[in-house]
Image: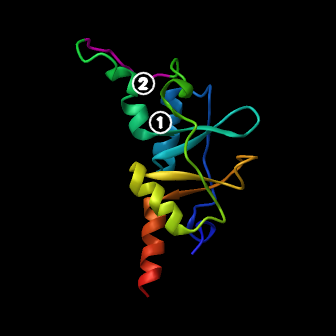
Amino acid sequence: MKVSDYMTPEVITANLKDGLHQTFTRMRERNIRHMPVLDTEEKIVGIISDRDLRRPRWLDGDPNQAQNYQMSNDLKVEAAMSSTPDVVQQGDTIKDAVSLFVTHKYGALPVVDNHESRKVVGMLSLRDLMKAFNDSLQ
């Protein structure tokens, strides 16, 4: 069972300079929770989740200091994304992908054509893994 058999090939992406509110709205409209973030050369440089948008990690830097946060387009994706995300290749096995999901508690992983070009060709989510699991039971 290969990643390419179960990944979602239609990928909605974000750019480093996209506004946080704009990105959150796009996710809600398309009913997705994760977006790969691409640089100007269309290479993956990060991933952003709806959780990152609702409460960026930098808000929790000092537990003794309250932080005011309003999701707006003045704040950019690059401020809230996870940089240099793990990825899987379309030819990787589902077993290898599951290992990454379990080890790192991921909700989704970008799928790239290869590790050198880092061109995003799909997304692999927990839902996709459940489909693969279901198929393995038959």
Image spot of residue 136 (x, y percent): 46, 81
Is 88 within the magenta? no
- Residue furthest out toward the top: 65
Image spot of residue 91 (x, y percent): 66, 66
Q: Dots 2 and 1: beta carbons under 8 Å?
A: yes
* Residue depicted at 53% across the width and 40% down the height: 26
Image spot of residue 78 (x, y percent): 56, 26
Q: Which residue is mark 2?
A: 71
Circle 1 residues within 10 Å: few <14, some 14–19, many ≥20: many
Rendered image quadrant of residue 83:
top right
116 horizontally vs 37: left or right: right
Tell me the element at label 2. loop
55 horizontally vs 46: left or right: left
| Numbered mark located on residue 1 in the image | none
| Amino acid tagged 1 | Phe
| Numbered mark located on residue 24 in the image | 1
- Residue furthest out toward the bottom: 138
Tell me the element at label 1. helix
* On screen, residue 95 above or below 31: below
Rendered image quadrant of residue 59:
top left
Q: Give whichever of 21, 69 is nearer the camera.
A: 69
C-alpha span from label 2 to label 1 = 9 Å
Q: Which residues are the magenta region?
A: 65-72
Image spot of residue 123 (x, y percent): 57, 55
* Residue depicted at 42% across the width and 34% down the height: 52
* On screen, residue 2 above or below 74: below
Q: What colour scheme was applied to this rendering of the protein?
A: rainbow
| Amino acid tagged 2 | Met
- Residue furthest out toward the left: 64
